[in-house]
Amino acid sequence: MATARGPGHQDPSAEVFAEAAAAFGLLASPARLHIVWALAQGESDVTGLAERVGGALPAVSQHLTKLKLAGLVRSRREGRRQVYFVDAAEQAAVLDVVRLLVGRLTGQAAPAAVPARRLRGL
């Protein structure tokens, strides 16, 4: 019986699979996936995101908190408002997956791949 692995190939560690599963788990929510998709297009405050994704302000805020705690989303203060964004350099792998999947499902071509880096903080 042939093995799926070639010579010299080693499976990633259980930690890597756990980290990837955690990211997929967060993105399993349509609302959070939509938020990441929207932030991949450009930064926004919670009000703008709620309007774009069609969610209630408190619900979108809770989703942003989860995404922020996981390190998938970052924020900065601009006066009285909090602006959310996805750090494309830090989350290139997540953005590539989201863009590829959503792009394929909508018939859009996925943008050129950005070199992937490991997820942090999951």
Image (cartoon, rainbow, N blue to C red):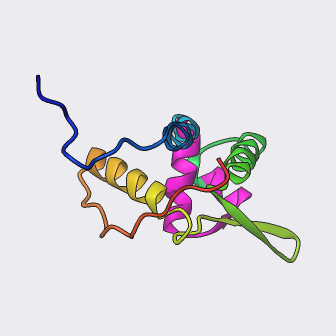
- Image coordinates for residue 109, horizontal then vertical, percent: 24, 61
Name which residue lies at 75% across and 42% down.
Answer: 62
Give the residue drawn at x 57%, y 48%. 53
Quadrant of residue 48 within the rendered picture: bottom right
Q: How many marks?
A: 0
| Residue placed most toward the observer, 102 or 15 | 15
Q: Which span of residues is magenta-colored? A: 29-51
Residue 48 colored in magenta in the image: yes
Q: Which residue ends up furthest to the front in the rendered image?
A: 8
- The residue nearer to you, when weighing 7 against 86, is 7
- Check the image and report above or below for 1 versus 29: above
Measured as percent of width and height from the top left, residue 39 is found at 56, 62
Q: Say which quarter of the image contains residue 81.
A: bottom right
Magenta stretch contains residue 112: no
> Toward the viewer: 69 or 6?
6
Q: Position of residue 100 (x, y in %)?
A: 33, 53
Q: Is residue 88 above or below residue 122?
A: below
Task: Residue lying at the far left in this picture: please name it.
Answer: 1
In x, y percent, where is residue 19?
56, 43
Q: Residue furthest right?
A: 80
Q: Residue at x 53, y 58 (%)?
A: 38
